[in-house]
Image: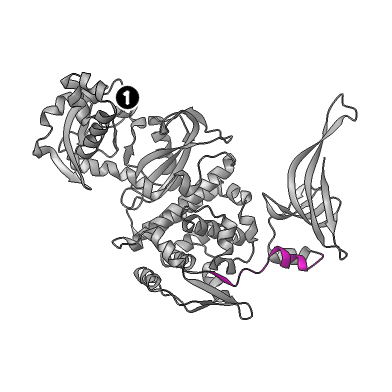
Amino acid sequence: MAFIRFQKVKSDSSGKILSGSASIIDVQYVPGKKHHSKQVVREKLGKVIEIYSKKRGLFESPTRGLVTYDAEKDQFSPSLTRQEVQASAAIHEIADDLFPETDIHTVFGDVYLLIEVLKKSNFINILSSTFKEKVFYERLLCHILYGILRDGSRIACDDFIAKSFLSYCVEDIRIQSLKSDTAFFTKMGEDNIKVEFFRNYINFMRSKVPSFGRACFVDSTPLPNNIGSPFNALCSHGVSATSVQMRLVLVLDELTCLPIWYEIIPGNVLDINTLKTVTKDVEVTLDIALNGFILDAGYISKELIQNFEFQEKYEQIPEKRYLGRMPAKKGFPHRSLYTKTRIYFGKSKYDFIRKNHTYFGKVVKERVFETDVYCYVYIDYNNALNGYTQYIKNNYEDFIKMKDKEKDWYKVKFGFFVLISNYFKTPQEILDDYFTRTNIETVFKTDKEYLKLLPLCKWSDSTVRGKIFTDIINSIIRQKVYEYIKGTFWSISSIIGKCQSLMCFKDRKTDTVYVETPRKQVKDCYRDFEIKIPSQISISAYLQQLYPQNADSV
């Protein structure tokens, strides 16, 4: 049986609670103990706001937000809005204390621009049709705008929103509760929400691009962590040392490189079964057939090679195709391909330029694991020369002892790599195909500084899933922003930096926001997005645009 333990509760003469905390205590039976029981803290309720009885009160929970808890029913309420607090609180001023007025002067330019991009691209309708609950949708917008516009800074979500124009548009949540939003990320981690979002998103994209969804399985990214995830495993693939990790697998559309699905898999699983599982999952869940797989070396194995049909030169490309980097390990002709093709090195016939790097490239048909494959042999001359120079500088004594044949290998070693595939193209075309996997860095940055995902140690398995899902949505929106600035000199960081200089202030009597005069660079930025800068905004009218109601379809 549970009860509430109140600690150091102080109140004024009117009965308003000034300080104090509370916890839920479980009484457990312990045989042999003096009183045959012991008391254990099940959950901290946080700050006490109001006490209705010894078994019921209003609390500011560090994980659940502003909630009531009833010990008799052992039940929490959902996170309360301002109106619900006003209706239930004995002292009405409590609502004003819990939901204080935001600052008069706030940052306008960056938040307003991103919201208008969401509206202009109709992406806001995808969000509102998926996340129909108003309070939850409001939290989602806060985390999306914060996740994109903080641009790698260390500012907390609640501080960021409190200083922005969005603080005027937040009606039903406490801005302070955004700092530790465990309940939000837990709900975002539910599979049904993920499925509904991607279905709505793909249907919307197909209304514009009918071929959207002929996708390629691009890559998997290691996520080292210390959480209790069932997908954790000891692995060294993709990191500098062995660590406990799980892996994030992304499925991207071939044409747009936008994410259409993702999975979290065990950290030590990189095989053909993973491809089959993800392929089937996408097919059943979203009615999408994957036709291409661009893989890193960890996935290339005997089983994978033998499971794909081979295309003879000039025949039709197989429906299922793969392209990956050949690992330099036993069973693969990595070094022997160097020996076989070195007579062609330096001949201009096999050279080409890609993004300021000069490459040697030649295709060779080989038999690997009793299966015909195409091996595309490359040397990145720029990387080879730099690596060769550094090696001689750092290892000169070892170098002069080498035989000439080994010196020749070190001359190309640092730029030498082999791609392996079941379909035929020119070496330049195949390299272009392969480098589409590097778009993963643009689509979804999993580095420590940008998304703050690593190391994962303060999260639970469910909240990690919710955090990753939120970041996937952010990555799609960032791609929408890229579409507007493609071909210009703008970067997202420069846009955010310039537009944050545009401020606004609110007239609390008329509920109108007045926008200050923008600088020339801010005007130029908005002009490139074809978005007008308003001189004033009615908050009540703007909320109807920001929170579309009854959005049954996209």
Give the amino acid type for the residue marked by disc 1 in the picture: Lys
Residue located at (36% from left, 41% from top) = 217
Q: Which residue is mark 1?
A: 302
Residue located at (16% from left, 37% from top) = 360
Q: Is residue 416 visible?
A: no
- Is 255 left, or right, of 40 in this rendering? left
- Is 23 left, or right, of 361 in this rendering? right
State the residue lying farthest toward the bottom: 510
Residue 350 pos. (x, y %) = 12, 38
Residue 209 pos. (x, y %) = 33, 57
Residue 110 pos. (x, y %) = 46, 65
Q: Magenta includes 476?
A: no
- Is 284 left, or right, of 225 in this rendering? left
Number of numbered tags placed on the structure image? 1
The range drawn in magenta is 90-107
Q: Which of the 4 quarters of the picture holds residue 82?
A: bottom right
Residue located at (56% from left, 71% from top) = 543
Residue located at (41% from left, 73% from top) = 519
Relative vertical location of residue 270 with respect to residue 430 in this rendering, above or below = above
- Is 172 left, or right, of 238 in this rendering? right
Q: In the image shown, does 378 or 522 lie closer to the viewer?
A: 522
Relative vertical location of residue 276 with respect to residue 149 in this rendering, above or below = above
Q: How is the image coloured?
A: one colour
Q: Is residue 181 visible?
A: yes
Residue 2 pos. (x, y %) = 81, 42
